Image (cartoon, coloured by chain):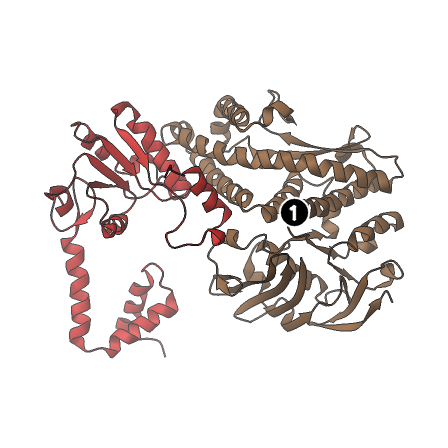
Chain colours: A brown, B red
Amino acid sequence: MRLKRLQLHDFRSFPTLDLTLNGQVNVFVGGNAEGKTNALEAVYLLATGRSHRVAHDRELVRWEAPAYLVRGDFASQAGAVQVEVGFSTEGRKVLRLNGVAKRRLSDLIGQARVVLFAPEDLELVKGAPEVRRRYIDLQLSQMSAAYYHHLAAYHRVLDQRNRLLKVGPQAEERGLPVWDEKLIVHGVEVIRRRLEAVERLAGWASDAQRQVSGGQEELSVSYQSSLGGDGQRSSREVPETDRDPDNLARAFRRRLERLRPAEIERGMTLAGPHRDDLRLDINRQEARLFSSQGQQRTAALALKLAEVEFMTADGGDPPLLLLDDVLSELDEKRRGLLLETVGRVQTIITGTDGAPLAGRLAVDVAFYNVTRGTITPAGEGRDR
Amino acid sequence: MPYSPALARLIDELTKLPGIGPKTAQRLAFYLLSRPTEDVQSLAAAMVTARERTIHCRVCGNLSEADPCSICTGDGRDRSVICVVEEAKDVQALERTREFAGLYHVLGGAISPLDGIGPEDLRIKELLRRLEGGTVKEVIVATDPNAEGEVTAMYLARALKPLNVRVTRLARGLPVGGDLEYADEVTLGKALEGRRAL
């Protein structure tokens, strides 16, 4: 999949922008606060329908403008695809696919696919479990509309169920058992797909870690489910035999039964995919707690590279890789491995200078200058 | 210059209506002022009359001027089937199909803790009472296919279980006249799940 043309209207710092992307690798060079990340954010928005930086569309509208619109023209295996995402400050979100208005985000998500690697992703290893869940959820949502549907439905049911638990013991007769069933139905679909994904991601991630560390570091990635165990820290790995949907549903139901008094006391749902985590070990020690910062950064990079592989391997369109200011954050060895991947899928890179790339890429590279709301080609060619 | 008190009050009242913000309210108010007095009186009278005459049918909960409503008392209706819906407007939608000749039961919403609506706030007890006689053989649950509608359907299925009546749910799937290739994965998946022998 390739992004051919990107148009922005009143998006962030851009009054208007009409940019043709020429290269397999496109490098946006500019100083801080000139709008490089805003442009990447727009591409991310086309793939996922939302920003990776802010929760509200309102914040994406240029100062004092009534609305923003982002339009992307892609060339995919299936032919030309045009995606439009917009928002007016009156509160109306606009989603269009090939010029046809779509009501639901699920009709749009995954039409364009991206893998974003930003400095905050270096927190993937030591950050909160939520960060790792988002890592899994974003790739699966782009790859499967069914996953996105179940995830969104799960969270809707979760909100309802949490509210119901807050009424106390009467929750039982006010419909709690049926909310349990609904939570289980969607939760099992989410967990099942996450388990499959993690198994595949683990292989690629551990290859990457081995490569950067010269075979010194063995990374293992596993899914930690909140459904099993009895103790306070009730996470555990899910054995192969428990992956059957019926077994998962049984385990989920048992867990909810056991947690019932605690859930009513605390007024919240204490088990389910929203409490699960990815466990990362380096050389058999939990990376979050025992690994050096260098090892953790390598693991974060390895997970991101695995994401590119996973999205490429499922037979769909290879994703666009968006590298937001991360090259300068990585040392020579790690940068080298990342740039190997860069040549294989269309990539947009932002940075304050193009120097880290000099002489490093053997594919067609286009450089662009970003200054206060404009992006202009800065000359093209093989390297520079 | 501020609006006259009468105009300001009109705009305020219009703003209370669903889906109407201050700008729309203002436009509607100015439109009303531009019309002949008789037209506006006729509109006001229609609103008051509709509000005064329309009641909830004590049997099915549907909106009606008669109590019980014309569907509940109708001659040609099949009294062995009750279709359960969330709102009175859903009855209108089903009636337009002309495919259903049974009776209705309007719940008055769906279970939604976030909106403070529990099973006891819906007309479920009334439904159970209607089933006591034993004439009803089937209950078709036609609540919306979202989380709240699904949970309401599941709750009803459990509540009706001991009564030995057949409980069915509306099928979900492809829209008529739609193209298979344009159907989203989720809808297509549901359609596959609910497939039938030819």
Q: Nearer the viewer, residue A344 or A213?
A: A344
Q: Pointer 1: what residue?
A: A315
The relative height of residue B144 versus residue A92 in the rendered view (above or below) is: above
Could you tell whether B39 is left or right of A365 in the image? left
User: How many other residues sit within 10 Å of disc 1, few (<14), some (14-19) or many (≥20)?
Assistant: few
Q: Nearer the viewer, residue A37 or B96?
A: B96
**Residue for point 83% across, 69% down:** A381
Q: Which quadrant holds residue A44?
A: bottom right
Furthest residue in direction front, as rendered: B198
Q: Nearer the viewer, residue B116 or A201?
A: A201
Picture coordinates of residue A309, whole percent (x, y) = 72, 45
Q: Which quadrant holds residue A175?
A: top left
Q: How many marks?
A: 1
| Residue type, numbered disc 1 | Gly
Could you tell me which quadrant the C terminus of chain A lies in?
Answer: bottom right
Label 1 lies in what chain?
A
Picture coordinates of residue A293, whole percent (x, y) = 82, 41
**Residue for point 31% across, 68% down:** B11
Picture coordinates of residue A184, whole percent (x, y) = 49, 31
Q: Nearer the viewer, residue A36 or A172?
A: A36
**Residue for point 16% across, 30% down:** B135
The relative height of residue B107 versus residue A316 in the rendered view (above or below) is: above
Determine the secondary structure under disc 1: loop
Picture coordinates of residue A203, whole percent (x, y) = 75, 36
Q: Is residue A233 visible?
A: no
The relative height of residue B194 versus residue B10 in the rendered view (above or below) is: above
Q: Is residue A353 visible?
A: yes
Q: Which quadrant holds residue A307?
A: top right
Could you tell whether A34 is left or right of A272 in the image? right
Could you tell whether A291 is left or right of B64 in the image? right
Could you tell me which quadrant the N terminus of chain A lies in?
Answer: bottom right
